[in-house]
Image: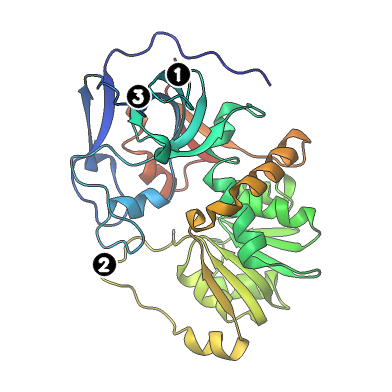
Amino acid sequence: MSTPATPRNLPGRNRRVILSSRPVGIPQASHFTFDEASLESLAEGQFRVRNIYLSVDPAQRGWTNEGSNYSQPVPVGDVMRALAVGVIVESRHAEFPEGLHLYGWFGWQDYAVVGPQAVVTRIDVIQAPLSAYAGVLGINGLTAYLGLFKLGRPKAGDTILVTTAAGAVGSLVGQLAQARAFHVIGLAGDDAKFARCTSRFGYAAAANYKSADAASLLDRLVPDGIDVFFDNTGGDLLDQALRRMKTGGRIVQCGTAAVSQWSPTPTGLRAEREILTRRLIWSGLLVFDHSEDFPGALADLTGRIRSGMLHYEEDIVTGLLHAPGAIARLYDGRNNGKSLIYLGE
């Protein structure tokens, strides 16, 4: 695939989305403001990235809230932390020349002045649409791939249950599992999404988890129990799925979208006896803990895309003005596929 041209008509100033107040729970548009800054000079070893696609991710809720135990929150008054795909338009680093496309920690802004430590992926040879490197070939694809195969460790004949099964991660888990002939069941948040689980994403069966209570829904979908539970929601679905896990089952905890806030700590059914008596393995998944496995996973995912074996969907809006409300929109389930903001040329 040919390399896209460096964007033209570059902005002369840097528009930025600033976290202006600290949310409790899901960030809303009111927690952000815009500003503009002049373009800062580069120090030796730095380069200027012009952002093209900004990523919107569920993890941004945790990055804005106090009390996260896995990352420091974005300071109030700073540019909103975000992954993005962009192109180097100015460089003082010999190994990062102008015209090189990158995926990394570039924030919700037009430009980022960074060094190599901010880069997640060098896109030396573009083998898919550029937007894919912020989703299926970014943390979403890596999360699905490594969560399923490294932490879930499915075996022949296993039944796999996935929540938010039509989402940017879940849709890939379903296809990767189906390609290995596992029996994979999906739960999604509306009728259109659960229909895509079976028609497009490889699920043997699926349901709208809002259509019935969790207990009766799981009794119908997984009557013989669950070997691997790839969970993106937590909450009542997790409480009920725990009690339907097979002995030696594996739970991959990828997200907690069903829990709107963690202060005060919500309460639910006790889990310890289920873990003990069923001999369960329950693993939390933060994909950057597995960065040593990124190259192999990305090579496999890229091959699947190029061969037409892996389908993905994108929900792309144009313009930085969409950024402040984008996280809330994601948690409301109003996106269809990977949520991206295109900044254009």
| CA–CA distance in space, label 3 to label 1 | 10 Å
- Which numbered dot is residue 24? none
Q: Residue at x 63, y 49 (%)?
A: 171
Q: Amino acid at mark 2?
A: Ser
**Residue topped by disc 1:** 344
| Foreground residue among 240 and 327 | 327
Mark 2 is surrounded, within 10 Å at the Cα level, by few (under 14), some (14 to 19) or many (20 or more) other residues, namely few
Quadrant holding the C terminus:
top left
For residue 190, say whether it is visible.
no
Q: Nearer the viewer, mark 2 or mark 1?
A: 1
| Foreground residue among 220 and 115 | 115
Q: Position of residue 299 (x, y in %)?
A: 69, 42
Q: Position of residue 325 (x, y in %)?
A: 33, 38
Q: Amino acid at mark 1?
A: Gly
Provide the secondary structure element on which disc 3 rests: loop
Mark earlier in primary sequence (2, 1): 2
Res 157 → quadrant: bottom right
Provide the secondary structure element on which disc 1 rests: loop
Q: Amino acid at mark 3?
A: Asp
Q: Residue at x 51, y 55 (%)?
A: 287
**Residue topped by disc 2:** 263
- Relative to 308, 90 lies left or right: left
Q: Nearer the viewer, mark 3 or mark 1?
A: 3
Residue 233 vs 251, above or below: the answer is above
**Residue topped by disc 3:** 110
